[in-house]
Amino acid sequence: MKDNHPIRESELMMTRRQLFGRMALGLGTAAMADLLGPSLLSAGAPSGQTGTHHTPKAKRVIYLFMSGGPSHHDLWDYKPKMTEMFGEQLPDHIRDGQRVTGMTANQKNGLPVAPSKYKFTQHQNNDRGVWISELLPHTASVAKELCVVHSTFTEAINHDPAITFIQTGSQIPGRPSLGAWLSYGLGNLNENLPGYVVMHAHTSFPEQSLFNRLWGTGFMPSDHQGILLRSQGDPVLYLSNPKGVSSQDRRAQLDTLAAINQGQHKQFADPEILSRIRQHEMAYRMQSSVPELMDLSQESPETIELYGQEARKPGSFAACCLNARRLAERGVRNIQIFHRGWDAHGSLPREHESQCKDIDRGCAALIKDLKRHGMLDETLVIWGGEFGRTAYCQGGLTRENYGRDHHPRCFTTWMAGGGVKAGITYGRTDEYGYNITDADGNTLIPQPSTDKWTPGTMHIHDLNATILHLLGIDHKRLTYRYQGRDFRLTDVHGHVLHDLIA
Amino acid sequence: MARRVALILTGLPPDPEQLSRYLEDEREDAYERLVDELLANPRFGEHQARYWLDAVRYGDTHGLHLDNRRGIYPYRDWVVKAFNNNLPLDDFITWQLAGDLLPNPTLEQRVATGFVRMNPTTSEGGAIPAEFQAKNNFDRVENLGTVLLGMTLNCTRCHTHKYDPIQQTEYYRLMAFFNNTAEYSMDGNAYVYGPVIRAPENQADWNQWTALETERETLLSQAGEEIERRLTEMQLHAEPTTHWSSENWKISKTVSMESPIPPEKDWDKAGDLPGIRRGNLPGGEKAVWLSFDVSVPVDQVLWLTYSGGPDSLVFINEIQMPLPHERVEDQRITSVELAFSEGSHQIQVKMAGTMTLTAVEARLDNAWQTMASEGMWEACTSKERLLMLADARGPLGHVVFQNPAHDLVDRITRKISTFTTSLVAKDRSTPRTTQLLRRGEYNLPTGDPLQPGILKVMGAFPKGAPRNRLGLARWLTSREHPLVSRVLINRIWQRTFGEGLVRSSENFGLQGTQPTHPGLIDWLAVELQDSHWDLKHMLRLMVTSRTFRQQSNWRQDINDPPNLLLARGPSYRLDAEVLRDLSLWASGQLDPHMGGEGVKPYQPSGMWLAMAHPGSNTKRYVKDEGRRLYRRSLYVYWKRTSPHPMMSLFDAPSRETSCVRRSRTNTSLQSLGLFNETQRLEMSRLLAERLIREQPNDEERLNLLFGLLAGRNPTDNEKTACEGLLDKLRKRYATAEEDALALLSYGDTLRNTKLNPVEHAAWSQVAITVLASDVAILLY
């Protein structure tokens, strides 16, 4: 075929989507194609070039999302003074006019301080130690790996807007999710598995809704959406051949299909036709790579022991964590586990005890497992929810039982591996765990906001900016044009927290 | 070409019979005749409606938090009807924005205002009403911007637009048009999220309803002279009928159907006199009881309207009334004429549970009320006029029109009895104050109250137009408006040619792409207005153009991969809905029923449950039975936080926000869906059956298969490939008949046992392969 043949030329003039099909070559990504200029496109890039804005610290991310808002009071943010304040009204100067949700705004018992009933222990890290509650004994055993941020904050106070905000950068639906941005920015390194995988872990309290939009693409092309790895039925939708159709049968079908499609391509020369042929082949490979991925029988008894016997139960948080490591090993760069049930308005102790039991061992095992495989350095692990919980009680308060409402002003998030400082804490809150303070415990005036970054604080835009940064992406330069505007995950905000980066 | 134009206009290939008629038609205008046939096909409206529903973000659920069911599908059916009837697009827009504000609005005009109610809503526990009042309105303004103005207004929510000449104040002036609607900002997680209106349940009912309305108007005009003669008599009759009163409205707890009238403690007082509306009726074998007292000073007739299934009962002073009309299986609400003698009476109604969800509703009306207060025939609604004419005890009781009127009332009542509810727009009597919200924060209103107003850069507000949604519609559809007709015609072009003349069809602002053919889009926009906004005319122009009728083959002489020059015909992958409909159609299973509540075809189990709130009424996906499984994809139930996976897989939007241009991706998961999804397996089996039954040999069967899906016979290459596959599969299934039987067991329909399973299985796998191939899934 001559080089200037129009069909050949059309193949060279790849569309953005097509470029994706080729990312396994290490060519970079559609987004990078824009950033680096068109010369790379036709020239082809040397294998192994990452095409990121700067040298990435992490190659992949595993996001453990605790949907519903875990209580920082009962897990991470130790407030011994609150014990003395049991049942007293939260002082007005602490609340400081902060809006309260419709659920506690007109409570008969006002806003009584509810100290945590759980024992906290200081665990050694690489800094001044970190206080962790007895609900998370396994996580505490990896304290030296954790970068614990006490000063995460958001503006949203209800689940739907808050979870949409932290996952898409906007409280109103319609934007691409963090995962979609990463898919757009990083592409897929694996030819046999999807690049962005989402899992839903079992909980005894499935009390929040999840929405497709949390791993959806908003206005981006839908091939960046997260692929659900399910614990019920086919792990990937429609993965299995129907009964009565063998892998050889499917091979024969795909060969026939390719012959028909090649004919179409001869006539129409649409590069999308070739791209589709490749996708059919990838689907065929996935039919063996996904079952292989899900088959835990190759895992040693020690590994299973690390995660606990729960890991044998499909859909358990531990099983999801183990799958996450297996996905990471196979080059999947973008993994999210959603665990619901953290919305403890009423019986927080009963619910959080069960929730922590679900996740604690899995979290610790994942970190240990990544570490012994030599992968922790290059894998960013994130743990957190959409907001925290209030210092005051919702509903009836006793020493043994209490509930907590939604609290956006501060909550705890941790990260590990992937280029973050290991074994540190960051940010501080007041003695009620209500407001973020400066390093000396003084109230911040003005309160931190997205207008200007305040040292020691981490708005969720800052968190997202930092995640992108660790993966080699400048959050201000990763843009997608829609309706004439260059959209960013972090909107016009976001500050990379260099203090957290090793 | 026939396949292309049929897919563009109706979303389905031409019927084989229609195709051969066209191919044999030697008249010069054979193609134009085919186009006219397609434009008149009811499938046209369904297909065109789909694009509009994406743009206005139509869904069957509220969209946020619990994502509960929402009753608004009559709006969807109205859109289909409007396109099929070729309602001029300016009316199409006006009715949707402000049908309720038109003089004496029709049912259609009011249902159309569902457009204003299409924004996602919530009732999350801690949500703050004022916050969502603002968010709901932001959503409406921004949707209007995308759908009709082709621009994003989102930026101006927080600051004056950086690129386009729009001020922040103007955003809030525009918002003021919507800030006055009567619904509460929280949806209460309710199916019936008021204001609502009763509307036909499906397309056939819409048509019958329209026919009944026409009949009513004809009868009333025939009776005109007679009525004029008796006007004084009527006024005299009307006055005493207004002195009735009712009190003590009560409603009981839910009880079983067999249960007698519940004891005193199980009753609640009901407000909203003389009537009630609250919550939903129970389903199936349950009932609630309604009770009230009525007193009348003279003998007179009142109309009682109440919701409930066909087994509902009415008692007056504990005596059961005969059923108002013959039994209607899917009854949800009905009206009954009650004749009272002077004095007090107790009414009790057993409102039986219904098969389909409906609100608890009851109302007592006097048809003479308006006549008494206004004294004028013209002031009365058509409904009241007909009831007065039909009233055997009234002054028109003996005129010749009384009998036909009474008969018509009966038929109308029976028709209305299956009406469902649909969300509509209605304005409050006292307007809300709108102020600029600093940084778009609901709790930071600043400055003076703002009057509703338009974007200055887009022409003046029409003289004499009211400062409400109707005025807004008049501005948008005025001849001077520079954008609306351009934006609409660009999207019509986009769905005809695959790409718009302005490729960024969602953005006509400075940051959007320039039109590829500026003169053409200008001309088309003006032609749209000159033709009185005639959609079918515009589509006819496009699909009969030489540009459209070009081959879509690659051209050696022009280097233009994105086809910016329009030097070849359109070619692209078909949408999710078309792919599914195609398999239903080719196998002869496509159910022609139009409209009605969203249908639930096969879906992998647990998909909703894995994500839903335990309190959500959409947490369990219950697959439909029978013909509903084979309904057109337009009617597939749309849960906004989790649409059907075969829709999402092929780039259908979630309908949480506006989508005026879908992406067209190729993914490996699509491949898995094309080959392994239950409905496609079932359809390929039925398609195989059709091939085997209709044609005698392999060659003819392949011809039929390709004829259906590609509109032509297979090429030699395709034939060889398919025969090779067929051969392999025959050998394979001959040695493993149990595999053949297993494969043939997918779906609810049973396999035709008269067919040899080996042959049937082999053909069904050939069929699914060709159905998945680019000859079937592409437009070309």
Image: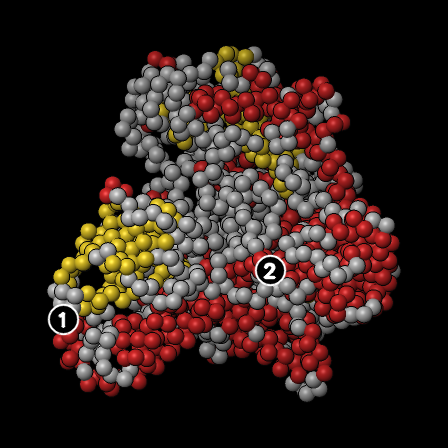
Q: Position of residue A57 (x, y in %)?
A: 66, 30
In terms of depth relative to the viewer, which is nearer, B631 or B81?
B631
Q: Position of residue A223 (x, y in %)?
A: 64, 48
Q: Position of residue A166 (x, y in %)?
A: 50, 37
Question: Where residue B724 is drawn, which disc sits there?
Answer: none
Residue that numbered label 2 is attached to: B630
For image coordinates 63% across by 67% down, the residue present is B12
**In the displayed structure image, the side of residue A251 where residue A391 appears, left or right:** left
Residue that numbered label 1 is attached to: B239
Asked if residue B286 can be seen in this view, the reply is yes
Relative to A57, is B124 above or below?
below
Task: Tell me the SS state at disc 2.
Answer: helix
Task: Tell me the SS state at disc 1.
Answer: helix
Asked if residue B173 can be seen in this view, the reply is no
**In the displayed structure image, the side of residue A65 where residue B91 appears, left or right:** left
N-terminal of the two: label 2 or label 1? 1
For image coordinates 52% across by 54% down, the residue present is B637
In terms of depth relative to the viewer, which is nearer, A485 or B73?
B73
Q: Callout 1 environment at 10 Å: few (<14), some (14 to 19), or many (20+)? A: some
Gap in angstroms between the C-alphas marked 2 and 1: 55 Å
Instruction: Output the chain of dot 1.
Output: B
Disc 1 residue type (three-letter)? Glu
Disc 2 residue type (three-letter)? Tyr
